[in-house]
Amino acid sequence: MIRVLRAFGEFWYDFIVGDDWRVAVAVVVALAITYGVSTTSIPAWWVLPTTVVIVLPLSLWREARVRRLRFRSGADGPATGR
């Protein structure tokens, strides 16, 4: 039973957090801000799209930078056939 619960928890962690925990945190914060704004008279529809516009390019830039550094060091470079 413990193994099943552990697998269930690992699935949800991987599904929600995935590859970048920073994006998951940004989504949780954006949802909290959306809730907070929705309790006022200000429309809240713009919070999540704004978050995507900000977080997505940052996440892609960070991953591209990591891959570029790995490629330059030879750790993830193309196969040379040797």
Image: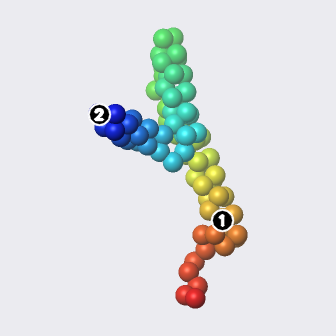
> Percent from the top left, x then y, of residue 76?
60, 69
Check the image and report above or below for 31 versus 16: above
Q: Residue at x 57, y 77 (%)?
A: 78
Residue that mark 1 sits on: 70
The amino acid beneath tag 2 is Met
Q: Which residue is mark 2?
A: 1
Residue 41 in sight from this viewpoint = no
SS for callout 1: helix
Q: Which residue: 58% across, 52% down?
A: 60
Secondary element type, mark 2: loop
Q: CA distance from mark 2 to mark 1?
A: 41 Å
Quadrant where the C terminus sits is: bottom right
Q: Residues within 10 Å of mark 1 (few under 14, many from 20)?
A: few
Residue 15, x across and y down, in percent: 40, 42
Whether residue 76 is visible:
yes
Q: Quadrant of residue 3?
A: top left
Residue at the extreme top: 40
Q: Quadrant of residue 1?
A: top left
